[in-house]
Image (tube, helix red, strand yellow):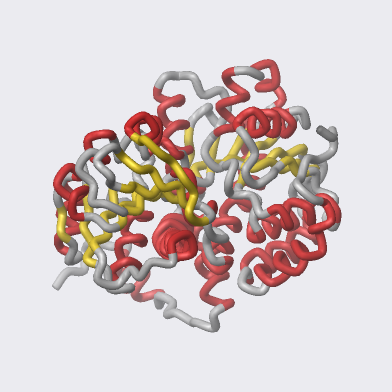
Amino acid sequence: MSKDFDVKDINLAEQGRGRIDWALKEMPVIRSLMERFHKERPLNGVKMSGCLHITTETANLARALQMAGADLVLTASNPLSTQDDVAAALVSVYEIPTFAIKGEDNKTYYQHLNAALDHHPNVTMDDGADLVSLLHQERSNQLSEMIGSTEETTTGVIRLRAMAKDGALKLPVIAVNDANTKHLFDNRYGTGQSTLDGIIRATNILIAGKVFVVAGYGWCSRGISMRAKGLGANVIVTEIDPLKALEAVMDGFRVMPMIEAAPLADFICSATGDKHVIDKQHFEIMKNGCCVSNSGHFNVEINIPSLEAMAVEKRQPRAFVDEYRLADGRFIRILGEGRLVNLAAAEGHPAAVMDMSFANQALSAVYVYQNGKHMKNEVYPVPKEIDEEIARFKLESMGIKIDVLTPEQVTYLNSWQEGT
């Protein structure tokens, strides 16, 4: 493996460049940051390592960080999410060392993570907390070189908060996922559209009229439920949180335990961030031909080893579809190896929502670099002023104006003397 990069085919670079430029047309906030960063160079000389899905949108984030002056290395945050032409373009066109190959095995995946840390970063950018976890568990000697990190996704934030609670976290991290301009749009509209896109590309099965079970009712699952309903599916939601379950009911969905939903389902998709949400007892009662997928960060949401043990035959009738035949003759279909189906079988989120998410990443990286030495080893929210700035940028790019409070209204909202 080259010390400088490891991609599938460097000759795909021009194809990747075209798709990266196409995505940038839908990323006005990132374009505006590129202009600002090129002038201000807020990350000049900072060594950064990013563990992110290597997609067209990520490439544009990387270009913005490069314009800000960062010395950047990238690696994939999921073995199946890499777009090989984008990885080639990052290396060949933009001269950003990249370690990512779609379909890489687990050994290669960790070699790539280590290659990113061989850069000896001062700031890391994670999507799933793999870089931060590896730093703490196997490369703790490098922690003294670190200023801080940012985290993109719900699963990573959960891991990092657990580390902070145990006193194990040794650097400050900004939870980009929790920004309103991230999870309200990326998680809901991005995951909703891209997950259904991945399921349809993998199966080409009509969604209308089918029973579609969604595990969880967080922002990602809400988006999936909404889009499945929009395509004509009969949607069932499973939950462990009574408030979220009540919301799902009020939003018009049936709610029941997975053990009751599994026999009814034509499709099941999990997006909870937890382990074995779809387990052996569910496989035992699933309908013949049920398509099972995951849109949570790690493939542990589906207990695939238990299905492997139950199966008498496994075949791949289509790309990204593994069909398991059970002893009683039923077939269970796992999409995208149980990994993020929107990236394994499709192209991930549309650029327009990643525009806001990656603006949060870029501005949070600048913030943690400038303030990290004075921050505690905790998980921090994205500063409110960054969140609001991104929302204003996005509205302006859409040609939308909003009202501004008058001085009288500001006084009224900040006083208690004036009542009815």
Q: Residue at x 80, y 48 (%)?
A: 96
Q: Residue at x 57, y 42 (%)?
A: 78
Q: Quadrant of the N terminus?
A: top right
Residue 300 rendering spot, x and y as whole percentages: 41, 35
Image quadrant where residue 283 sits: top left
Residue 214 rendering spot, x and y as whole percentages: 29, 54
Q: Residue at x 70, y 38 (%)?
A: 49
The total of numbered circles placed on residues is 0
Instruction: Report the side of 96 relative to 330 (left or right).
Output: right
Residue 333 rendering spot, x and y as whole percentages: 38, 49
Where 86 falls versus 205 (above or below)?
above
Instruction: Report the side of 117 relative to 400 (left or right).
Output: right
Where 228 falls versus 144 (above or below)?
below
Residue 240 rendering spot, x and y as whole percentages: 20, 41
Instruction: Report the side of 119 relative to 349 (left or right).
Output: right
* 115 or 381, nearer to the observer: 115
Q: Is residue 339 visible to the viewer in this orientation of the structure?
A: no
Q: Is residue 215 visible to the viewer in this orientation of the structure?
A: yes
Instruction: Report the side of 335 relative to 228 (left or right).
Output: right
* 345 or 283, nearer to the observer: 283
Image quadrant where residue 402 sits: bottom left
* 279 or 405, nearer to the observer: 279
Q: Residue at x 62, y 52 (%)?
A: 363
Q: Quadrant of the C terminus?
A: bottom left
